[in-house]
Structure formats: structure tokens, C-alpha cells
Amino acid sequence: MEYFKNTHNPILPLSHHVPDSEAHVMPDGKLYIYGSYDDRSDVYCSEKYHVISTPDLEEWTIHEVSFEGAKVPWFGDPKAKKYPGIDWSKPTPFIQKMLSNMDMAAEKEKFEQQEEADKPALLFAPDCIYRDGKYYLYFCMPDDSEGVAVSKSPTGPFEHPIQLPCSGIDPAIFLDDDGQAYYYWGQLFSHGVKMNQDMVSFDETQIVHDLVTEEEHCFHEGSSMRKIRDTYYYVYADMERGKPTSLGYSTSKSPLGPFTYRGIIIDNDGCDPASWNNHGSLECVNGQWYVFYHRCSRGVQQYRRLCIEPITINEDGSINEVKMTSQGLGKPFEPGEIIYGYQACALTGKIYIDIDGKGSEWLTNISHRDTAIFRYIKNKEGFLEAILNTQGSGRIRIFLDNAEVGTVHVRKDGLQKVPLKTNVVGSDQELKLIFENPKELKVISVVLN
């Protein structure tokens, strides 16, 4: 196990990438996060899960491997039962775009032509729930099979996997107040069904299809269900803005619909030039609701990072859209506090966050007029100087809430001290860096004093 303290985004140490986060407060009062585990750049996810836990949203534990794809008996077995998946004959805008993209089609065909034994036993987005002394982990795999494994501990190991009678991705599990459990899954068209009391089976003839869809609800994938007061919230990767970088939601007075589209909670577009998807959940911790989501890094769609933001549920049931922040769960960055380059929450241009070869990360691949934003900075009396730790060369203009407060011409590696204007004062401010004429420029950290 690995222990650490942190309240800023990204939440986990740089060597751990946990996207697709389903967050649940379990009976012991701790918050547990179940997600995929990115550890390669050529495909999403990996062949294992790690559970993350915290008692207070400050001290965190990364637990040992909780489940492995190699333990799924039906994966790679040509005799395993197959269930109908996405109906590709339904011409949604995404299906039309995907089928016209020859690269994606070629990759799909390449995967399908692999020998069954050669396919990696990848584990995609999971969910987990507690019932009657046991924890049930629901998972899916690249052959579109879905299953459930069981443990007496919220951190696993989860054992004795059972295949469920459905096909698709991104399972979600929900236990209603009356004790009835519901199972959700799907891509472009979602599906839901009442679980049997054993939590490892359901009547496939009772599946309700098209609970939320791409065309009516902007649904792409990544189902997650919560109940807030008397309303059911279906949260998912939202296509409203052209690609599924948003988490959107639809609501209903019934766990199986009908659902009404309500809008977007958070959008991770701009976390990286390659940003493509999002997947997360809502959870209430000590009376405060949070949205759990991910941001990618390294100029690829993978290497996604767990991030968390507080949200507000309004009296009418709506949720205000929130911006990605660097501060995350914590307070705004204090004067003198190091703000690391990898904590940038919004990037424009070609710039992205990448490893430095020594276990740390920085802002790199910087081109002319690229920008990096950090939210938020505590500023009550104004700042006298900024100290930037950089490599390479170029001009860096420094802004607080869009007011330019300083400029530095970087000509050497190391610390760059920049005098700042002192008349720009505000409580929580946005720090923005604009880069001009960079040459192999990298930003390791910023400190405002």
C-alpha cells in the first residue's frame, strides 16, 4: 500500500493514473474510489484495478491490486457465451463519424482479428457496492463482456467472477432506499435493469433499453447513478459539445426513467491537446457534494488523472457547471506555496504535461502564444514577485484574472525572479502564463510572494 497527503489536483501521486472514478462512502465511513488504471499509452486502462481510500479527503491510501483481468475465466474463451452489443445500424452522429474514420475502423478490425489468447485482459471502468456484509465489484472488458466479483473487504481482493447476461461497457450499480438494486451500462444507448437479490444476476427479459441516448440526452458512455433527495441523477460522458469531454446529467423520479436532460457538470476539454473522454461520479462527503472526474496528460488520450471538485446542488435540483481547478479539494494556493507545472488545470495550444525522466512532471511542448492556467491563488494584499523554475528559453507573461502583472525573458535554466505589480488584489484569482517565442521551454513550478 502507498500512503500520502494531498488536497490539490491531480489527487494521486504522479506514478498512478486512475480514471473513470466511482466514489462511494462505505459503511466504515471512509470514501472509496473505484476506477480503471492507466499504465500504457497505446490503449486505455490495464489488466488490474487499485482501490483508493481516504477517511478525510486529505490522507489517502492506494491499496494493493484488488482484481486482475487474468482471473476472468471466460475472457479469451471462444466457447464463452456472447450477448448482443451496440446496434451499429442505428445511425447516431457518433456512429456515422466513427464508421467514416478509417483509422478507428482499422484498429477495431485489427483487435477483432487477434487470436483470442493474444488479446490483453484489460479491465475497463468498474463500480462497486456494499450489501449484507459483502462488496460487489462490477467490471467490463474489451470483448464487451461484463461481470461481477465479490469480496468481504471494500479494497478486495475480489474473487469468483461471474459473467452477467449482457454486453457493453462501463457498468454502474445503484442501491435504492427500498433495498432494490439496479444495474446500468452501455455506450450511445444506455440500459438498466433490476438486480436480483443475490447481486450477481438479473432477468435479461426485464432490461429497459435507451434510458438515455446520444441524440436525446447527449449520452456517450460512462453510466453512474445517484439519488439526491427524491430525484435520480444519471451522470455520464456527455457529447453536447462535440466530444465526450464533459460529464453531463439527466434526472428522473424513477431509477429506470424516463430521464430529462439537464446539462453539464464539468468539462475537461483543455486539460491536454489530446483530451477526448471523461467519466466520473458524484458523492456526498460530510454534507458536501463533489464531482469526481479525470484529466489526461502527456499529449495522449491515456495517462488520465483523478481530479475532484466541490459542486452545488440547487433547490430546483440543477447542478451548476464548475471549472477544472488546480486547488481541487483544498484551499486556494497561499503566497509562498509551490504551484507545480503539472497542476495546471487548463491549457491552450500544443502545450501539455509530461514526465521529465526523473519521476516528476512539467509543462512542456510549449509553442508561441500557448497558455497555462492555475485556479485559484489566494491574494489579499498583492504580490511583489514571482519565482519560476524553468528550462529552455522564451518570454513568459504573467496574468492574474487577465490583468498582466509581470514579464520575464527566460535565457537560462533554473529559478527566474520576476517583479510583479502590487495593485492587483482579489480573494481567489486565476493565474495565467502566456508563452512567446519559446525554445525548448519547460515550466517546473511557480511561486508567488
Image (tube, grey):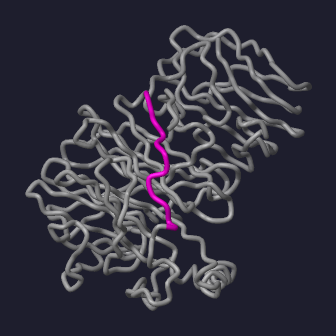
Which quadrant would residue 87 be assigned to in this image? bottom left
Q: Is residue 317 left or right of residue 9?
A: left
Which segment is the magenta one? 59-70
Residue 129, position as x, y percentages in the image: 27, 54
What x and y, as percent, mark residue 25? 28, 42
**Residue beneath the point at 63% across and 21% down:** 338
**Camera-nearest residue between 75 and 292:** 75
Question: x and y percent of residue 109 in the render?
Answer: 63, 86
Front residue of this view, candidates 117 and 281:
117
Residue at image point 19% right, 62% down: 252
Q: With respect to residue 430, does 334 lie above or below?
A: above
Q: Horizontally, is 133 left or right of 67 in the view?
A: left
350 left or right, relative to 329: right
Q: Position of residue 137 (x, y in %)?
A: 34, 59
Name the side, left or right, on which 195 lies relative to 188.
Answer: left
Q: In which quarter of the image is residue 204?
A: bottom left
- Residue 363 in which image quadrant: top right
Q: Which quarter of the figure is the C terminus placed in?
A: top right
Magenta residues, dominant SS class: strand
Residue 94 magenta-highlighted: no
Residue 272's place in the image compared with 344, above or below, is: below
User: Which residue appears farthest toward the left when viewing the image?
Assistant: 178
Question: Of 158 and 307, which appears nearest the observer?
Answer: 158
Q: Residue at x 53, y 80 (%)?
A: 76
- Write the residue at 15% across / 64% down: 254
Vertical placement of residue 155 versus 126, above or below: above
Q: How many marks?
A: 0
Q: Reply above or below: 78 against 40.
A: below
